[in-house]
Image (cartoon, rainbow, N blue to C red):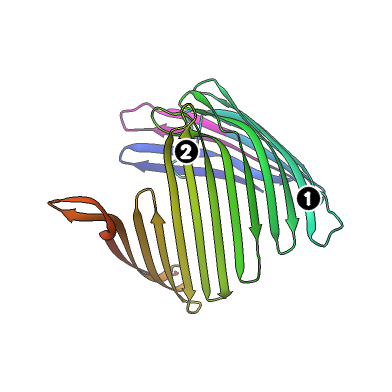
Amino acid sequence: SLGFIFTDREHEGRFNRVVGPDGQIRLGQSSMLSFYALGSFTRASNESPRQDGHALGFDYLYDTRNWNIQVGGQDLSPDFETDAGYLIRNGLTRVRALIAPKFHPRSAVVLQLTPSLYTSQLRDKCSGLWETENTFSLSSVMVRTTRIALAGSYSTEIFLGQRFNTSGWTAQVKSQITKQFYVQVMYRDGKAIRYSESPFQGYGKRALASLGYQPSENFNWTFSFTFSDLFRDSTGEKIYDYTIIWNRLVYQVNKYLFFRAIVEYNTYHRQVLTDLLASFLYIPGTVIQLGYGSLYDRVRWEDGAYINSDRFLETRRGIFFKASYLWRL
């Protein structure tokens, strides 16, 4: 398949246009080549000169029952911009490759073992420095769609013209325990970056645990726990620790009407967020929605100012109503 991308956006004097072809070519039953070649033309204001940039890339995939091989490369100029999409980073040249043989043991429990080696070498055009990522992982696919993976990596990252170490190891487990319960656990320990105007080398941990419960097609509950911390590498000083507890409950009354409730607790900001939604979807494009949200802080009002408290106080609230009708001509 071949395509051509054309976007043209102008807002308050800013102008951005992106044009170029992209496509996918199937080379055989097990291999595919993807590519894109885009040019961007941007002007920050009516008085500003136009900045031109480019984004070039390709990816080759070979995937069979016994092998997974991937090779790719990208080149993005520092002036490439796109207002129509989400661009994480520009000004780089990168090549990457993955090789992963697949083994199928004669076991009633372990269905597949896959060791993999991934490497990525990137040149940051703004600083002229190189960063690297080299990861070895071992994953297994087991019964009940259970997947266990263990990975270790040596990696660096360029941030604000400096190279930082981001090496570490990760363990992950995913499993559909029963038809109703799904669980996922992830843990990472390694080097990290303090992203700020004055960045520095750090280290820390990240942990994620989520549980899904769906006793019927109409009821769905999801719970997740996320933790992250950061320490200064040179002194061991704790910079922060961050925990987010998130709950979502969805009740689908019928194919048209559903109710959703979200409650989130953030230990760093000491806040509770609530979000309630009722939605009636007759057909795509014809919908009625009513929502209410609020934010609770552990503060109290005293002597004309907020001060810390052990009790939660609702500090913000909002309500919205939406009705749309799809009229086909």
> Which residue lies at the image location 78% right of the left edge and 50% below the top edge?
113
> Which residue lies at the image location 42% right of the left edge and 71% below the top edge?
286
Vertical side of 31 occupied by 43: above or below: above
Q: Which residue is mark 2?
A: 230
Q: Nearer the viewer, residue 197 or 223?
A: 223
Q: Nearer the viewer, residue 4 or 189?
A: 189
Vertical side of 39 occupied by 221: above or below: below
Magenta segment includes 48: yes
Label the magenta part by its dominant secondary structure: strand
x and y percent of residue 232 in the render? 46, 31
Other residues around mark 2 within 10 Å, as few (<14) / some (14–19) / many (≥20):
many
**In this image, 327 relative to 292: left or right?**
right
How far apart are the two marked residues, 2 and 1, measured between alpha carbons?
Answer: 33 Å
Other residues around mark 1 within 10 Å, as few (<14) / some (14–19) / many (≥20):
many
Quarter location, residue 107: bottom right
**Element marked by disc 1:** strand
**Element marked by disc 2:** strand
Q: Is residue 81 in sight in this rendering?
A: no
x and y percent of residue 85 in the render? 48, 44
> Which residue lies at the image location 59% right of the left edge and 50% below the top edge?
186
**In this image, 300 relative to 20: left or right?**
left
> Which residue lies at the image location 61% right of the left edge and 30% below the top edge?
94
Point out the frontmost of discs 2 and 1. Answer: 2
Quarter location, residue 257: bottom left
Q: Which residue is mark 1?
A: 113
**Which mark sits nearer the N-terminus, 2 or 1?**
1
x and y percent of residue 95 in the render? 65, 31
Q: Amino acid at mark 1?
A: Leu
Q: Amino acid at mark 2?
A: Leu
Range shown magenta: 34-55
Q: Is residue 272 in sight in this rendering?
A: yes
